[in-house]
Amino acid sequence: MSAPILEVKGLSVDFQVEGGQAHAVRNISFDLSAGETLAIVGESGSGKSVTALSILQLLPYPAASHPSGSILYRDEELMGADEATLHHARGNNISMIFQEPMTALNPLHVVETQIGEVLSLHKNMNPAQARERILELLLLVGIQEPEKRLKAYPHQLSGGQRQRVMIAMALANEPEILIADEPTTALDVTIQAQILVLLKELQAKLGMAMILITHDLGIVRHMADRVLVMTGGEIVEQAPTHEIFGDPKHDYTKHLLAAEPKGKPASPPDDAVTVMTAENLRVWFPIKAGVFRRTIDYVRAVDDISLEVREGHTVGVVGESGSGKTTLGLALLRLISSQGAIRFQGENIEELSGKVLRPLRRQMQVVFQDPFSSLSPRMSIAQIIEEGLLVHGEGGSYEDRRALIARTLVEVGLEPSAMDRFPHEFSGGQRQRVAIARAMVLQPRFVVLDEPTSALDVSVQAQIVDLLRDLQLRHRLAYLFISHDLKVVRALADEVIVLRDGKVMEQGKAAQIFDDPQTDYTKALMAAAFDLEATEGGAISN
């Protein structure tokens, strides 16, 4: 390995909080050599992103401070450097791809303006020069027909396209070091695979060093030369990738490697009662045009889908963003209009009005993707869980409801004392347990789980999967489990529906779908989820 181009020595980061200081990073040291990929792994709150932001001195001061540390880029000190030095380092020498492109990109500016700003600030390019360079960059990151994307706003791009624009911005000035902070977390598995292959190709082509921040160990195994493992703001282990995966030394590293969701779903008996069925279900949204807003076509979000979910049965619904997964779940719950037969416990519900349908809603519940946005920040945990009981007139007196809420919290793995606290006081995994408790307190028969683990660390994902499996066995629940994470689906679902553009590409027993997929699309999904190397040969196109 060549001499380091980046050296971090004794770095500590504190944040000013009510009542004192929070120690986010504690005296860590590491280096990075030219052309090397260093992965920093760990769960939320471990200090990964704070470390990356410290390198570019992007933390919010004075709320954040550095009690100790030195950050040397080619022997030039960045810690406490003046604005001129930092301005040159940021973008020119070291660039960063942020975690969520939808929030990192400015929603008010088109693609050309956002990439052009980088070129104007660092290269003093005029508009004509900038446009030529922007087109080169968009082609470089795999955006087809880039001229058509110049005037597009972020909301008009797919998740993968937004991430490619972020990469183009980061590469605009050909930096020597690229910091990629969870660059694929919000993306579908096939798009993840494309972005990772793209990053490796660009790194080889441009000779960059890369710091990859992630909690996905599958990505690390295929991308990194060395791995740095963090927890509680400290580095507990750093070694070449093959050593980390082949012979981990620290207990926390072993814990991370063992945290992938495991186990198999418990298949229901053959005589299990059917809870929910759909026949030839369609959800079409009209496309209107002209002065009189006539319907000229339809977006076929769900197109002729049939399914059956029984007691103790989990049907997994997989596919990329826009495939119709969530729309299918909302249609079954009668939260959006649809055509086709929907039967809940043998009763036709597709034509029922809101007032007639309300008594059945207690038995049909949903757990959403992001527990932080689905829980009201102004309500206590008790109020959040109690809300459904009050709507349906369940739970008895105030004291009876408190006792029921306490029992439900225990059932989902939380202390009853948590009921008088607020969502912001809990971790992501704890908030998702609260969201599950909110659904379970009503003793439902059918639960739609819409990406309930996608926002969670891998070890917390495994805990939530175990919890959902336990609740299903205990209460004979019927689940519709929506996810793009096929490892989680494999651990929970005994039947799988693969969707693409609203249509069923493949449907059947999970074992058959995972072990012997029949369609090219399903094969591409499996390759992306379970064998990243398979995508490097072109299994999935851009």
Image (cartoon, rainbow, N blue to C red):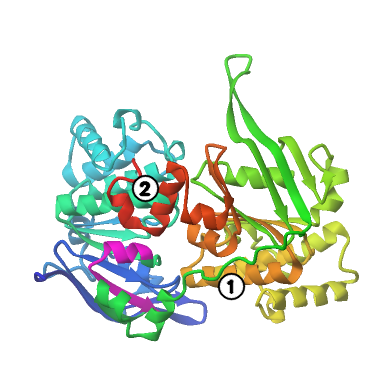
Q: Amino acid at mark 2?
A: Gln
Whether residue 294 appears in this view of the structure is yes
Viewer-closest of 206 and 381: 206
Choose top left, top right, bottom left or bottom right for residue 134. Answer: top left
Residue 71 showing in the rendered view:
no
Q: Earlier in the sequence, mark 1 or mark 2?
A: 2
Using the rendered view, name the quadrant where residue 209 is placed.
Answer: bottom left
**Residue 411: horizontal and vertical position, in percent?**
71, 76
Q: Which residue is mark 1?
A: 426
**Pointer 2: what residue?**
163
- Give left or right: position of 259 versus 247: right
Q: Is 452 placed left or right of 150 in the picture? A: right
Query: What stretch of residues is rendered in magenta?
Result: 218-231
Residue 399's spot in the image, x, y percent?
86, 76
Q: Nearer the viewer, mark 1 or mark 2?
A: 2
Q: SS for tag 1?
A: loop
Nearer to the camera, 354 or 293: 354
Q: Residue furthest left?
A: 2
Residue sticking out furthest to the right: 397
Amino acid type, label 1: Phe
Q: CA distance from mark 1 to mark 2?
A: 29 Å
Q: Nearer the viewer, residue 423 or 446?
A: 446
Most extreme residue toward the top, as rendered?
291
| Label 2: element kind | helix
